[in-house]
C-alpha cells in the first residue's frame, strides 16, 4: 500500500508537464530558426559536429529527472505490514437521489451538489463506523460498498451525478432494498440508512419496503432536498451549452417541488426521523448525534501499517539523471581537436 507524505505538492507535476511542452516547442522552434537563417544546404555545414539526438537525449534526461525529483518531493511511503484493526461502530449507508430533478436550484448551488457537500461533511464526522453509498433514480445500485476508508468513500461520492443512472424516476423502494442487501445479512441491528431525496415521482411499494427494513432492524433517516415552493429544472444543451428548463408535453416549464409526505412515511415506519435540508442548518450533525447513541458492534478491517519512506530511491534516480544531462556533450569531439589539446 502506497501513500504520500506531502500530497499538497502534487501540483508540481503540472510544472513537469509544462516543461515537457516547452521542450517540444523549443525543438520545433530551433529547427525552424536554423532553416530560416541558413537554408537547407548550409545548415548541415553550420551544425557539423553537433549531434541532434544527443541534444534530444539531454532534454529527455532533464524531463525524467524533474519527474523523479517531484515524486521524491511528495514523499511516497510504502506500508510494510497488513494488520487487523478492530473498531466499534455501526454500518451506515447513504442513498443519494441522482434523478434529474435534483438539479433544481431551490437550494444553493443545487439539490444534488448541496446533498453531496453535506454528505461529505457527514462522512468526516464518522469515527469507526463503516459507510457505503447507494445511487438511485429510476433504478438503484450499490455505488460504494461498506468501508472504513472514508477517503475512498468521498471519492465515490464526488463521482455521483445525474448522469450515473440513465433511467429517470425516484425508485425509493428499490433504493431501500439495494441498501438492505449491502448490509451483513446476519445483523438485525447496528444498521442505519440515510436517504437524501426530493421525493418527487417516487416509484415502487414504499410502505412494504419500509416495513421489511424495520423487521430487518434497519433505521432510516430521510433527508428532504429542496423546498416546498419548488424550482424549475435546468437543462444544459451539450452542444451549444445553452441553458433551458425541463418542460412538459404542452411546452410549459416544469416546477419540481419537495414531496415530504413519502419521506416522512419512510422515516416513521422505521423509527427514524425526517429532516429538511433547506430548513435545518445541521441536518447530518443531528443524525450523527443519534448514531452516537445506537448500540455499537465490533467492526474488523485490515489496514497497512509500518509505513516506510521511499523518497530516497526517486531522489537518487533523479539526481543521477540530472548529472548525466549535465555531463553529456552535445557535440562530437573530433580527433584533430583532441590532438590539438
Image (cartoon, rainbow, N blue to C red):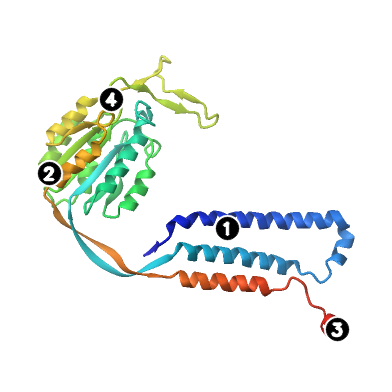
Q: Which mark is residue 258?
A: 4
- Counting residues from the start of the chain, the first of labels 2 and 1 encountered is 1
Measured Cα–Cα span from mark 4 to mark 3: 90 Å
Callout 1–callout 4 Cβ contact below 8 Å: no
Labels 3, 2: front one: 3
Residue at the location (21% across, 54% down)? 128
Badge 2 is on which residue?
A: 216
Q: Could you say which is closer to the camera, residue 28 or residue 120?
A: 120
The answer to which quarter of the image holds residue 303 is bottom left
Q: Which mark is residue 16?
A: 1
Instruction: Count neighbours of disc 1 (C-alpha within 10 A) and say few if under 14, some if 14 to 19, many if 20 or more.
Output: some
Residue 23 at x, y percent in the picture: 67, 58
Q: Which mark is residue 340?
A: 3
> Tag 4's secondary structure?
loop
> Tag 3's secondary structure?
helix
Instruction: Count neighbours of disc 4 (C-alpha within 10 A) and say few if under 14, some if 14 to 19, many if 20 or more.
Output: many
Query: Could you tell me which quadrant the C terminus lies in?
Result: bottom right
Is residue 148 shown above or below 234? below
Callout 2–callout 1 Cβ contact below 8 Å: no
Instruction: Count neighbours of disc 3 (C-alpha within 10 A) and say few if under 14, some if 14 to 19, many if 20 or more.
Output: few
Amino acid at each position: 500500500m502506497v501513500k504520500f507524505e506531502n500530497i499538497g505538492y502534487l501540483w508540481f507535476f503540472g510544472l513537469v508537464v509544462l516543461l515537457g511542452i516547452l521542450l517540444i516547442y523549443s525543438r520545433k522552434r530551433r529547427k525552424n530558426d536554423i532553416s530560416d537563417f541558413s537554408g537547407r544546404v548550409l545548415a548541415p555545414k553550420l551544425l557539423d559536429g553537433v549531434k541532434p539526438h544527443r541534444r534530444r537525449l539531454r532534454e529527455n534526461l532533464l524531463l525524467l529527472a524533474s519527474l523523479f525529483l517531484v515524486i521524491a518531493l511528495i514523499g511516497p511511503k510504502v506500508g510494510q505490514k497488513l494488520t487487523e484493526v478492530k473498531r466499534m461502530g455501526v454500518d451506515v449507508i447513504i442513498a443519494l437521489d441522482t434523478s434529474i430533478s435534483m438539479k433544481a436550484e431551490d437550494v444553493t448551488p443545487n439539490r444534488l451538489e448541496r446533498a453531496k457537500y453535506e454528505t461529505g461533511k457527514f462522512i468526516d464526522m464518522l469515527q469507526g463506523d463503516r459507510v457505503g453509498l447507494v445511487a438511485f433514480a429510476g433504478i438503484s445500485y450499490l455505488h460504494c460498498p461498506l468501508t472504513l476508508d472514508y477517503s475512498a468513500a468521498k471519492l465515490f461520492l464526488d463521482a455521483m451525478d445525474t448522469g450515473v443512472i440513465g433511467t429517470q424516476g425516484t425508485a425509493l423502494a428499490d433504493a431501500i432494498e439495494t441498501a438492505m442487501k449491502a448490509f451483513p445479512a446476519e445483523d438485525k441491528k447496528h444498521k442505519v440508512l440515510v436517504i437524501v431525496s426530493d421525493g418527487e415521482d417516487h416509484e415502487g411499494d414504499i410502505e412494504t419496503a419500509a416495513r421489511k427494513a424495520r423487521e430487518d432492524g434497519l433505521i432510516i433517516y430521510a433527508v428532504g432536498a429542496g423546498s416546498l415552493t419548488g424550482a424549475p429544472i435546468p437543462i444544459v444543451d451539450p452542444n451549444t451549452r445553452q441553458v433551458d428548463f425541463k418542460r412538459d408535453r404542452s411546452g410549459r416549464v416544469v416546477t419540481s417541488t419537495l414531496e415530504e409526505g413519502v419521506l416522512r412515511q419512510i422515516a416513521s415506519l422505521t423509527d427514524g426521523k425526517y429532516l429538511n435540508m433547506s430548513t435545518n442548518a445541521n441536518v447530518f450533525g443531528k443524525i450523527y448525534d443519534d448514531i452516537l447513541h445506537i448500540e455499537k458492534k465490533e467492526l474488523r478491517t485490515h489496514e497497512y501499517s509500518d509505513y516506510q519512506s521511499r523518497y530516497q530511491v526517486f531522489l537518487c534516480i533523479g539526481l543521477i539523471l540530472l548529472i548525466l544531462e549535465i555531463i553529456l556533450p552535445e557535440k562530437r569531439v573530433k580527433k584533430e581537436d583532441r590532438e590539438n589539446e
